Amino acid sequence: MSQSPGAAVSPASAPPAEETPELSSAPRTARPAEAERPGDDTAPRPLAAQRVLPLRRPGRWIATAIVLVLVAQIAHGLVTNPFYQWDRFQYWFLRPTILDGLLITLEVTAYSAVLGLLGGILVALGRLSRSPVLRAVSWTYTWLFRSVPLIVVLLFLYNFSALYKTLSLGVPFGPAFFSFDESRLATDIVVAVVGLSLNEAAYASEVVRSGILAVDQGQHEAASALGLPKSHQFTKIVFPQALRSITPNYVNLLINLIKSTSLVFYVSLLDLFGSAQSMGSTYPGDIVPLLLVATVWYLILTSAVSVVQFYVERYFSRGATRTLPPTPLQKLRTSLRDLRARARREAAV
């Protein structure tokens, strides 16, 4: 039976309407957490009471314990072994003989360090020169003095007067302008300084050359574009930047130079080691304390150079790093501040 278009449909015969989710403007809320029951250990703890535990590293603790035991054993042996004779060490440490030798060591080291660095700069520039003669001579000099032991150089210079009685300057194979007696000029300290400087310049030349080569090529091009002379390019732009790479390597050479001064004893110069060795020959029972005296003074000198190295490196690192490396005092303050903050956190928990 057909229905007219205007006829109404009864609710009973109407098709079921599709169920659609209700749209609401109210925000959804999370289900309320279940109330913690007393005695329930599985209930979540608040975030403020939670702690992040670091990973356990048993290997690190075992290695630390072994190192501490070894250090304690060495310290115990140094203190309790009567063979070291620490009372005699205290007696010899500031004796005038030892201090005179220390002054000679400082004097020889200062002269040799300055002359060695200047000579190393000249040899390095010769290696980088466009002249084949300068390159060949500089390479030969570096090759020779890096190959010959320092003790051989010192002994050869000490006996140099046997080969040449007089030294003269003039035209080759022609007349001499002036001459002088080599034996009068070559005193013990002069022989020591010349020998150490020649040896130091050979090693310093490679350090300086590597530092110059480490400067970016764009710096050379920028300096040339500004129209600066070659001398200004080197002294104002290239060499100041190269010093940042040269400093740590040259300080290693300087520390080695301080220790190498002990060899001047073999050219009759009583430096620190020579004075200790001489006193050891006079007092055979004090050989070990005297060697300890020389060792401690060398440790003091090298430690002082290391401190100066830190501040020089920090000075030349300006502009190359965003923040300067902290000084030891600044590191100590930071460590104490972190320790206090950690103690406060531990107390709050």
Image: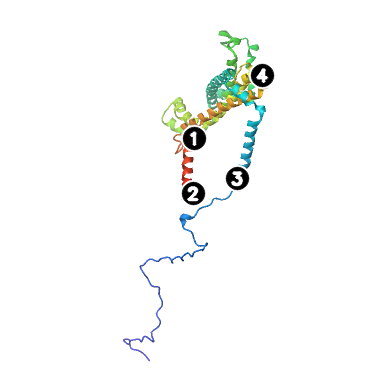
Whichever of labels 2 and 3 marks the residue nearer the N terminus, that label is 3
Question: Is the Cβ of the residue at disc 2 closer than 8 Å to that at disc 3?
Answer: no
Q: Which residue is mark 3?
A: 61
Amino acid at the residue labelled 3: Trp
Question: Is the Cβ of the residue at disc 4 closer than 8 Å to that at disc 1?
Answer: no
x 47%, y 43%: residue = 340
Whichever of labels 2 and 4 marks the residue nearer the N terminus, that label is 4
**Element at label 3:** helix
Tell me residue 42's x, y (percent).
52, 62
| Distance between the alpha carbons at the discs numbered 4 and 1 | 42 Å
Q: Which residue is mark 1?
A: 328
Q: Which residue is mark 4?
A: 283
Regarding residue 160, the answer to whether it shows in the image is: yes
**Element at label 1:** helix
| Visual colour scheme | rainbow
Q: Nearer the viewer, residue 63 or 83?
A: 83
Amino acid at the residue labelled 2: Glu
Residue projecting furthest to the bottom = 1
Amino acid at the residue labelled 1: Pro
**Element at label 4:** loop
Q: Which residue is mark 2?
A: 346
| Distance between the alpha carbons at the discs numbered 3 and 1 | 26 Å
Amino acid at the residue labelled 4: Tyr
| Distance between the alpha carbons at the discs numbered 2 and 3 | 22 Å
Task: Give the quadrant of the N terminus.
Answer: bottom left
Q: Is residue 95 left or right of residue 228?
A: right
